[in-house]
Amino acid sequence: MKKLILSNLFAIALTAGFAQPVVKTDVAALLNELAAPPTTTADAFARAYPNGATFPDASQYYKTWTNKVERIGLENQLLQKDFYTKYPTGIRPVAQPVSRATPQQHSSMDAATSELAQKMLNDPAFAQKFMQMSEQEQHAYIAKLLADKGIKPVEGTPNTNDAPIPGTDMDWAGFCTAYTQAAMGLSRWEAQTALQEKYRAKHDEVNAWAEAEIKKLPMISFGEYGHDHDPEKVKAIQKQALVKHRDVAEAMLKEAAPMFAQFRNDFLQRIAALNDALKSVNYGAAYDFGNYYPTVLSTQAMMLSDADGLLKNEIEIINECARWEYDLRNFK
C-alpha cells in the first residue's frame, strides 16, 4: 500500500550548516620552522648557555617556537572543552528536519488526514478507487482536500532527513588511526637511547684514560702534607681529558644530526594524510566532521605533542654535549 505523508506537501527540509573548527595550523609547516640541530659543540654551547648562563638549557633558544606550540595547544584544549561541555557523552545528536508549517497548518493537516482516513474506512468503493490512483493523482486529490481547508501546498522537496552523514566524505577514522599507530612506535626512542649509551661509553673511556695517565705521574713530596702527583701535570692531563670529552661530544652531535633529521622526516610522513585532509576542509571553518570531531581534535593535539616531543629529545642531546664545551671553556 502506498504511504501518504501529507506533511510532505507543506514542509521543506531545513539542513543548516554545522561548522566544527579545529585549530587552523599546518603542523608540517610548524615543524619546519625549527632550526636544524647543531653539529658542533660551539653551536650547542651558544644555544644552551645564553647570556652567561652557568647551567645548560637550550629550551630558551627555542622559546618562540615552543610558546607558539603551547598557544595552539591551548586553542585545541578550549575547542575540546567547548565540545564536551555541550555534549558530555562525546556524541552530538543528529539534527532533525524542521517543518515550516504553522500550528494552524498542522491542525488543518491533521483534520484533513483524519477526514481522508475516515472516508476510506467508511467507503470501501472510494478506498479501492483511491488505491488505484497513480501517485500524482493521489497528490492532486490531497492537494484539493487541503485547499478546501485553506491550505495551499508549497513547492519544494519533502521534509526528510536524507542529507549525507556528516564527516563520511573523508576517512577521518582511518587518518587518525594510522597516525596514532605510527606515532606510538618505539624505534626512534630506541635509536636515541642507543646513541646516548654509545657516547657515554666513550666518555667513560676518556675518564679511564685520564685516571691512568695521572697514575703514571711521579709522586712528589709536599713535606708535612705528604706525597702526591704534581698538580700542574695533573691539571694538564685534566685539560687534555676535557678536550677529548669535547671531541666525543662533537662526534655525538654530528651523528645525532642526521638521526634527528630522519626523525623529523618520519614525523612529516606520519602526519601527512591527516594534516593534508585538515587543510583540504580549511580546518573545519565550514565543515561538519560529524561524530569524528572529538577524535580529530584529540589527534590534532597528539600531533602537536609529538612535534614538541621531537624537540625535547633534541634539546636533551644539545644540553649534554654543550656541557663539555662549557667545562672546557671554564677550566682553570
Image: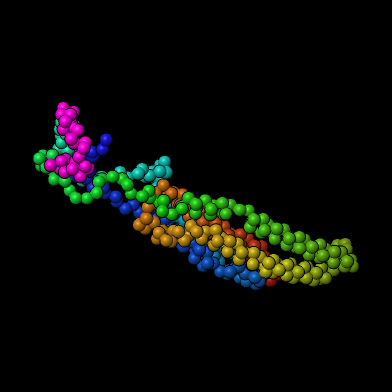
The correct choice, above or below, for 150 with respect to 78 in the image is above
Place of residue 227 in the rendered image (x, y in percent of width and height, measured from the top left): 88, 63
Place of residue 241 in the rendered image (x, y in percent of width and height, measured from the top left): 77, 68
Q: Is residue 86 magenta?
A: no
In this figure, what is the number of numbered marks? Answer: 0
> Residue at 31% of width from left, 45% of height from top?
161
Nearer to us in this view, 133 or 84: 133
Place of residue 144 in the rendered image (x, y in percent of width and height, measured from the top left): 12, 42
Nearer to us in this view, 59 or 282: 282
> Residue at 27% of width from left, 35% of height from top?
1
Query: Left or right: where does residue 121 sit relative to residue 194?
Result: left
Figure colour scheme: rainbow
> Residue at 73% of width from left, 67% of height from top?
248
Q: Which residues are magenta?
A: 120-144
Q: Is residue 267 visible?
A: yes
> Residue at 86% of width from left, 62% of height from top?
225
What secondary structure predominates along the stretch shown in magenta? helix
Nearer to us in this view, 291 or 58: 291
Nearer to us in this view, 236 or 78: 78
Query: Left or right: where does residue 213 sit relative to residue 112?
Result: right
Place of residue 230 in the rendered image (x, y in percent of width and height, measured from the top left): 85, 68
Name of the residue lying farthest toward the top: 122
Q: Is residue 63 visible?
A: no
Residue 223, picture quadrant: bottom right
The correct choice, above or below, for 177 with respect to 236 in the image is above
Query: Left or right: where does residue 77 sit relative to residue 13?
Result: right
Quadrant of the frame with the C terminus = bottom right
